[in-house]
């Protein structure tokens, strides 16, 4: 079920940084567009994006506020938080805590709900930027 995949995406891949779960949750040809405006393809492309975020905030955390799902598609309202411990959005580490909100759109692999095939995330980057200055 897509709702379970979304929960696993945030719980295992982001909050636990569980690299072993990537292959189970993401389709091999996974398409991802993150809040920072970058689009990547495949599991390794996603890992690179994740590692870039982790380098900027080693305690980056995601909380699902709400999920709406229909078949193989879902949308989630998310609250992101962390500590600015490394380069992020062209800003060197400040050590400050930050939090911002966003929304994410998910699609499960065609004919299956066992893996995510596409995720598009829009975060309040203007709000995050204000906090990192």
Image (cartoon, grey):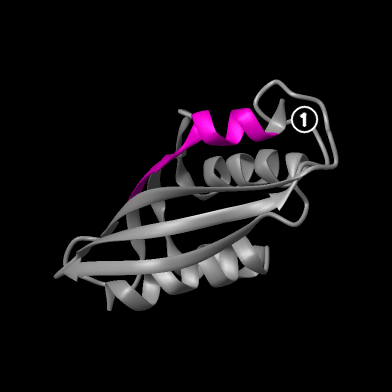
Q: Is residue 124 magenta?
A: yes
Report the side of 78 relative to 58 (left or right).
left
In which image quadrant can residue 72 be found?
bottom left
What span is in magenta? 118-131
Q: Is residue 44 magenta?
A: no
Residue 77: percent from left, percent from top: 36, 58
Residue shown at 38% from the left, 72% from the top: 5
Q: Which of 124/121 is in front? A: 124
Residue 110: percent from left, percent from top: 19, 61
Q: Which of 69/117 is in front? A: 69
Report the side of 104 relative to 23 (left or right).
left
How many other residues sit within 10 Å of disc 1, few (<14), some (14-19) or many (≥20)? some
Residue shown at 36% from the left, 51% from the top: 104
The quarter of the image holding the N terminus is bottom left
Task: Name the residue beneath numbered marker 1.
Answer: 87
Q: Is residue 117 above or below residue 8?
A: above
In which image quadrant can residue 85 be found?
top right
Residue 21: percent from left, percent from top: 57, 70
Residue shown at 37% from the left, 78% from the top: 4
Residue shown at 72% from the left, 25% from the top: 133
């Amino acid at each position: 079920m897509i709702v379970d995949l979304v929960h696993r995406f945030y719980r295992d891949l982001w909050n636990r940084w569980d690299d072993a779960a990537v292959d189970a949750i993401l389709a091999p040809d996974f398409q991802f567009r993150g809040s920072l405006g970058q689009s990547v393809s495949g599991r390794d492309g996603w890992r690179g994006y994740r590692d870039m975020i982790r380098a900027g905030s080693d305690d980056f955390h995601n909380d699902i506020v709400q999920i709406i799902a229909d078949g193989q598609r879902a949308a989630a309202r998310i609250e992101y938080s962390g500590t600015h411990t490394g380069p992020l959005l062209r800003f060197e580490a400040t050590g400050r805590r930050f939090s911002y909100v966003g929304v994410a759109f998910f699609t499960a692999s065609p004919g299956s709900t066992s893996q995510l095939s596409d995720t598009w995330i829009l975060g309040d980057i203007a709000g995050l930027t204000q906090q990192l200055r």
